[in-house]
Image: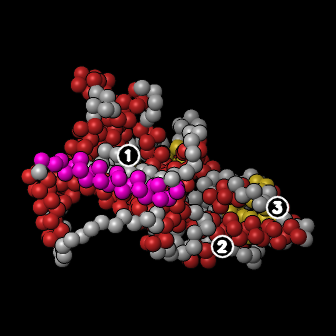
Amino acid sequence: MIHVSGLGPGGDEFVTDETRRLIADHPRRFVRTRIHPSAHLAGDVPSFDDVYQSADTFDDVYREIADRLVTAAEEAAVGGESIVYLVPGSPLVLERTVRLLRDDSRVEVVLHPAIGFVDLVWARLAVDPIESSVTLVDGHEFAIAAAGVSGPMLVAHCHANWVLSDIKLAADETGAGTNDDVEAIVLHHLGLPDEQVIRTTWANIDRVVEADHLTSLFVPQLREPVGQALVSFHELARTLRRECPWDREQTHRSLVTYLLEETYEVVDALLALDPDDPSTDDALVEELGDLLYQIEFHAAIGEQEGRFTMADVASGIRDKLIRRHPHVFEQSHDGDVTIDELTTSWEAIKKAERAAKAQSAGGSTHSSPFAGIPSTTGSLSYAGAVLKKAERAGRPVTVASPIDLASVVDVAEHLLAVVAECRRRDIDPEVALRALVNDRRLAVERDLTGD
């Protein structure tokens, strides 16, 4: 069992009697960090400050701390004891280690109330957080957690000036400085003799104090919400779908041609990029915007029909990317991995996803090695995808190569000659290549299934 309590927002006077009793009654105690004014009350006990120095990300820090605490609790349980885990502030306010412990089935967690830093914030600012509808935001996740919110916001975990800089830039995605002169309040060392409540402007939030783990930020009202450009664009797509006669008539199918055109134009812009000429970015920005509108357009149609929304699209790809990157997001990943290992893992995850979809649809769980190749892709891309997947399945497709092609130019020249010969013989090269590739694909599938 793990008893979790808080050491208050700053001075010893904010530590509750219950927390002091837990400290007195439990010899097995841990503090998340000693870098806290009242941590000394816990005595000479282990902390996890070393984890902050060795781990690559904050997620790694929190997972490592939680794992160590579970191990300690299991060891204590052998002797019929429990442990106490003490965190800064309150255990229920932005404490990810506590969240991880509560979600861990290996251990029982008992939470004890404590005074958090937010209590001092409301007192210093004379703000009722309920009546004012204050949003509490983690500074590490500001760009995501504060999306669409203009205020009021209380931003925690502003433990360094670079964090404040990132927060500031997240609310100025257009680069126009729209929020530069709005009021912001930096709260530093509340409850300590050197307490500071600094009223400043948004442009200066990262310049008025040397931020540390006892620094937070209060934002009464931003002029332009975080992520406003994307929110406005999403609303524009909805408006056009409702009010433009042409947009209203479109369907998913009627937009296919435009989607392909915009995709090819993005490719053209990518190929035209000059690393030494930033002005070539302009065309890419424009074409990416056109392609993004096509995605928003399809989402607007789906939303209007009550079938899916842009949020479904975004959350779906987010979940898929997390699922396909266990080496980044899973606790069990082991250090660095090679590209070959990543490729193998990626294919295995995709295969499992396809099998799960087939099973949920009531079909066979057998998955073709060529599953996932778009049927409408061009024949050259189709041929390349089939050859690659056949090789990965251990059944490479052999083709005759009667001439020596020594360079990329030679290969392209030969390919062009083949197209010219097809024209001379009145053969559609697109159709002919697709038919041949389909024959080879079927042969590989028969070989794998034994049919």
Q: Are marks 2 and 3 in contact (CB under 8 Å)?
A: no
Q: Secondary structure at mark 3?
A: loop
SS at mark 2 in the image: loop
Mark 1 belongs to which amino acid? Answer: Gly
Q: For the magenta stretch, what is the residue range?
A: 426-450
Packing grade of label 1 (10 A; few <14, some 14-19, many >=20) is many
Q: Is residue 379 visible?
A: no
**Who's the residue at 24% across and 22% down the image?**
245
Quarter assignment of residue 352: bottom right
Q: Which one is closest to the eye, mark 2 or mark 3?
A: 3
**Which amino acid, mark 3?**
Met
Q: Give percent across and percent down for residue 161.
A: 43, 65
Q: Is residue 433 left or right of residue 15?
A: left
Coloring scheme of the render?
secondary structure
According to the picture, the residue beneath numbered tag 2 turns out to be 48
Residue 426's spot in the image, x, y percent?
A: 12, 47
x and y, in percent, of residue 224 in the image: 35, 42
Q: Report the amino acid beneath label 2.
A: Phe
Earlier-in-chain disc, 2 versus 1:
2
Earlier sequence position, callout 3 versus callout 1? 3
Instruction: Kindly report the distance in space between the C-alpha atoms of the residues bearing marks 2 and 3.
Output: 19 Å
Which mark is drawn over residue 227?
1
Q: Farthest left residue?
A: 424
In this rendering, is residue 95 above or below 236?
below
Q: Which residue is mark 3?
A: 1
Q: Is residue 419 magenta?
A: no
Is residue 288 shown left or right of residue 137? left
Q: Are marks 3 and 1 in contact (CB under 8 Å)?
A: no
Q: Residues within 10 Å of mark 2 (few under 14, many from 20)?
A: some
Percent position (x, y) of residue 67?
69, 67
Going from N to C along the chain, the mark reached first, 2 or 3, is: 3
Q: Are marks 2 and 1 in contact (CB under 8 Å)?
A: no
